[in-house]
Image: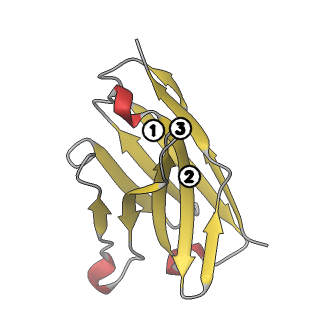
Amino acid sequence: QAHLVESGGGLVQPGGSLRLSCAASGFTFSKFHMKWYRQAPGKERELVAAITPFGYLSTAYADYADSVKGRFTIDRDNAKNTVHLDMNDLKPEDTAVYYCNALLDGADYWGQGTQVTVSS
C-alpha cells in the first residue's frame, strides 16, 4: 500500500528557512513524478514544485510556481525514497499546509500534509 509521510513543517519568521521531507513507501518511488502542493486557509490547493524521475544522463527536471522560483528547491533521493523541498526567504504568504504527491499514469498518491506558518 502506497504511503507518503511529510515532515519538517513548523513556525518560522519571515526571511527564514525550512526543509520539508516526504518519505515514500509501498510503490516504485524512482518511477514517479513527485510534487509538492500547498493549501492556505480559504484558498485552493496549488502546485508549488515538481520533479521528474531521473532519465537520460541521470537528470531529473524540476519546475516551480512563479511565486516560489528562486526561493524554493525540490530534490529527490531515490536511494532513500525521499523528496525534499528546501524553502528559503519565507514570506507570510507561504503559510499553508504542504502536501507531497506522487503521480504516474493512473496512480496518484497523497500525504497527510505538514503545516508551515511564517509569522513574526
Residue at image mark 2: 99
At horizontal 60% and vertical 41% (from top left) the residue drawn is: 114
User: Mark 2 vs mark 1: which is more N-terminal?
Assistant: 1
CA separation, marks 3 and 1?
Answer: 21 Å
State the image quarter where residue 49 is shown. Answer: bottom left
Identify residue type, mark 3.
Pro
**Local secondary structure at mark 1:** strand
**Local secondary structure at mark 2:** strand
* Front disc: 2 or 1: 2
- Could you say where residue 26 lies in the image, as x and y percent from the top left? 73, 72
Residue at image mark 1: 19
Is 29 rendered above or below residue 76? below
**Local secondary structure at mark 3:** loop
- Does the image show residue 8? no
Q: Is residue 51 left or right of residue 8?
A: left
Q: Quadrant of the C terminus?
A: top left
- Could you say where residue 39 lies in the image, as x and y percent from the top left? 51, 46
Identify residue type, mark 1.
Arg
Q: Quadrant of the N terminus?
A: bottom right
State the image quarter where residue 104 is shown. Answer: bottom right
Is 51 rendered above or below residue 84? below
Going by the picture, which residue comes out furthest to the left? 70
Identify residue type, mark 2.
Tyr
Residue at image mark 3: 41
Disc 1 crowd rating (10 Å Cα; few below 14, some 14-19, many 20+) is some
State the image quarter where residue 56 is shown. Answer: bottom left
User: Mark 3 vs mark 2: which is more N-terminal?
Assistant: 3
* Front disc: 3 or 1: 3
At horizontal 62% and vertical 55% (from top left) the residue drawn is: 23
- Does the image show residue 53? yes
- Its colouring scheme is secondary structure
At horizontal 33% and vertical 20% (from top left) the residue drawn is: 14
